[in-house]
Structure formats: C-alpha cells, structure tokens
Image (cartoon, helix red, strand yellow):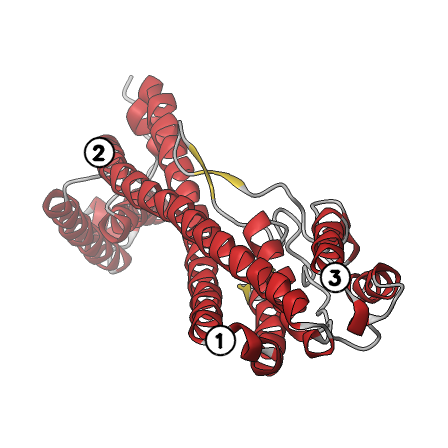
C-alpha cells in the first residue's frame, strides 16, 4: 500500500520564510559586531572566560576614575600654587620696601601698601576652582577667610583693637618698646595663633589626602590656617592697623623689626608650601603616566578577548545579505507556483 505526504502551496511558501527569520537575526548580530567591533553576545562567545573579561573592564574603570579625580586634584593644586606665588610676591615686595626705608620713615610709608596687601591676601585665600575653595582644607564649600577690614569688622580685627586699647595704659605717646613687644607677642599667641585664627577662618586644618593611584595617596590642597599665612597677616596688620606713627621712634623701630621678622619667616614658609604642593603635582603626573600604560595593557587584553576581526565580520554581513536576497528570490518564485503546477 502506497501513501503520500501532505503537500500544499502554503507549506512551500513558508519554508524559505522560516530561514529568512534566522538569517535576519544573524545579520543583526553581524551588523552590531561590525559597528562595535565586539562580539554581539560576549557571554555566549567567551563562556567561562567572561568573568575574566569583566574583571579587566572593572580594573580599567578604576584607573579611569583615578585619572579623572587626579584632574580635579591637579586643578586644585595649580590654582593653589598660583595664589601662593602671588602671595609670596607681595610678601617679598613688602619686605624690600621696609628694608629700603630708614627706620624713622617706615611707619608712615607702609600704612597704605600694608592695608592693600592685607585685603589682597584675604582675596587670594578665598580663591576657588571648579566650585571649590582651594584654601579651605577639606571644607571647600564656603570662602575660608573673613576679610580683616570687612564690614562688620572681623573677629580678628576686633580682638586686635581690644588688645591695642589695653596694651598701652599710659597712651601711645608714652609707650615703651617693651610694651610694644609684649603687645605683639600677645597678638601672636592670641588672634593670630592657630586657635585664635579660627575666629575669622572657616578653613579646616586638615588638607585633602587624595588617592592618586592604586597604591598611592598625596596631599592635594593647602589651608588658610597655615602658619606662614597667619604670620603674613599679622605683619600687614602691624603696618596698617595700629597707627604706628603715633608711637615714639624706639617703639616704631621695635614694631617694624617684628614686621621684618614675620615677613621673612612667612616668605620661607610660603616657599616650603609651594615645594610641598609641587611634589604632589609631580607625583600625580607620574601616577597618570603609569596608569595610562596600565590602561593600555588592560585595553589590549580586553580587545583580544572581546573584539572581532572587522574583515571577517564584514564578510559575514555580505554573505548573510546574499543568503537573504536568495531566500527572498526563492519565496517570490514559490508564489508563482500552485499545487497543480507542482503535481504536473
């Protein structure tokens, strides 16, 4: 007994269409690989090796994040260095002007330049970069320093004027060099000490310790509370806000000698601050170079696992397009057939 299978035009038409769907999916993957140059399905392609590929990508992402954060730290350091250089230039100029004047002419001549430089010092210490106040230590969201001569008067100026009124009970004209020395010592130990300075400074003593590589940290900020900056502010205050011209000559001499000492000490301290920040800048540059080399090695390792041969991917796209076109052509021919033609 002979049997025949079920044959219809619908079955004949649908046979190539089923193949086209599979070919179109393969073509979509091939096109994606051509555009991205990566395997369309990393997990299916690498199998158990996918965990290693993801680990390499995580390591590369960490290096990229560190490099980006180093960019922020470098900007903070560059801004701090520029401000410190300007501050030191002013300090050195003030010192040169004092030394160039005879003792009896210093008091009258330095009032205006000292006041100007005191205001400039506050402005420099309130410098910001990328929305951060660079001399705020770890507190970067607000200007660190209240200007000495602002309105209302800063706490530091109030403390200076209060101390001044109490230091010379017999009046300025009858003051002695010893009284002036004691007064200036009190200012250094009081409003211009590390503790007293906090009355006008919102900066933190703690500076940024930034991670600059996988195994290194570096100091990447300065604080407006640093001793050289307090010494410099006091020198400017002595010259501008205690009316030195009202005192006897020997008292003026004692005050100007203290100014010279403070300016010299501040200048040396500023040089050290710049050197310390410069070391951090160099370390960041070196760390970035090392991480760039590490990143390139990781990238090559990732590419060797995840990337496809672009020539081979293009060949696959061309071959699949050809197969799809052939399938479309076959489908069109099938549509011209009917069951009678098939059986004939």
Mark 3 and mark 2 in contact (Cβ < 8 Å)? no
Identified at 68% across, 78% down, the residue is 245
Q: Which mark is residue 102?
A: 1
Residue shown at 26% from the left, 42% from the top: 292
Q: Which quadrant of the structure image shows residue 254? A: bottom right
For label 1, the crowd category at 10 Å Cα-Cα, with few meaning under 14, some 14 to 19 and many 20 or more, is few
Relative to 255, residue 113 above or below:
below
x and y percentages locating residue 116 in the rendered image: 59, 79
Quarter of the image that includes the N terminus: top left
Q: CA distance from mark 1 to mark 3?
A: 20 Å
- Count neighbours of disc 2 (C-alpha within 10 A) and say few if under 14, some if 14 to 19, many if 20 or more: some
Mark closer to the chain start, 1 or 3:
1
Q: Which residue is mark 3?
A: 176
104 versus 49 height, above or below: below
Task: Classify residue 151 as left or right of residue 267.
Answer: right
Q: Secondary structure at mark 3?
A: loop
Question: Residue 68: horizontal and vertical position, in percent?
Answer: 42, 49
Q: Secondary structure at mark 2?
A: helix
Residue 145: which quarter of the image? Answer: bottom right
39 relative to 226 in the view: left or right: left
Q: Residue at x 77, y 50 (%)?
A: 190
Q: Observer-nearest residue: 306 or 183?
A: 183
Q: Nearer the viewer, mark 1 or mark 2?
A: 1
Q: Earlier in the sequence, mark 1 or mark 2?
A: 1
Find the distance from the CA under tag 2 to the CA under tag 3. 73 Å
Q: Which residue is mark 2?
A: 297
Instruction: Tell whether 143 sits left or right of 7.
Output: right
Q: Is residue 270 left or right of 175 when viewed as pictured?
A: left
| Whether residue 105 can be seen here | yes
Residue 4 visible somewhere in the drawing: no
């Amino acid at each position: 007994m002979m049997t025949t299978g079920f044959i219809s035009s619908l079955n004949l038409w649908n046979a190539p269409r089923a193949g086209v769907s599979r070919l179109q999916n393969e073509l979509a993957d091939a096109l994606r690989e051509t555009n991205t140059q990566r395997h369309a399905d990393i997990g299916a392609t690498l199998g158990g090796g996918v965990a290693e590929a993801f680990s390499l990508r995580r390591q590369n992402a960490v290096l990229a994040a560190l490099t980006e954060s180093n960019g922020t730290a470098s900007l903070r350091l560059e801004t701090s260095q520029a401000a410190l250089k300007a501050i030191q230039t002013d300090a050195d100029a003030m010192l040169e002007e004092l030394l160039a004047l005879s003792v009896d002419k210093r008091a009258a001549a330095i009032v205006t330049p000292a006041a100007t430089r005191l205001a400039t010092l506050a402005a420099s210490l309130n410098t910001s970069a990328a929305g951060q106040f660079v001399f705020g230590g770890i507190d970067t969201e607000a200007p660190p320093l209240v200007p000495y001569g602002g309105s209302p008067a800063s706490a530091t100026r109030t403390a200076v004027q209060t101390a001044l009124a109490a230091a010379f009970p017999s009046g300025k004209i009858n003051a002695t060099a010893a009284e002036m020395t004691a007064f200036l010592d009190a200012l250094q130990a009081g409003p211009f000490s590390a503790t007293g300075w906090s009355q006008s400074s919102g900066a933190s003593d703690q500076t940024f310790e930034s991670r600059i590589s996988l195994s290194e940290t570096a100091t990447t900020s300065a604080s407006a509370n640093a001793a050289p900056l307090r010494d410099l502010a006091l020198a400017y205050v002595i010259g501008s806000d205690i009316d030195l011209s009202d005192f006897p000559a020997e008292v003026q001499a004692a005050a100007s000698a203290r100014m010279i000492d403070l300016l010299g000490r501040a200048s040396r301290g500023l040089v050290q601050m710049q050197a310390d920040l410069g070391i951090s800048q160099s370390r960041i540059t070196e760390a970035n170079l090392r991480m760039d080399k590490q990143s390139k090695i990781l990238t090559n390792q990732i590419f060797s696992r995840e990337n496809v041969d672009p020539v081979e991917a293009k060949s696959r796209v061309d071959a699949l397009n050809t197969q799809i076109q052939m399938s479309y052509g076959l489908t069109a021919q099938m549509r011209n057939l009917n069951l009678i033609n098939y059986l004939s």
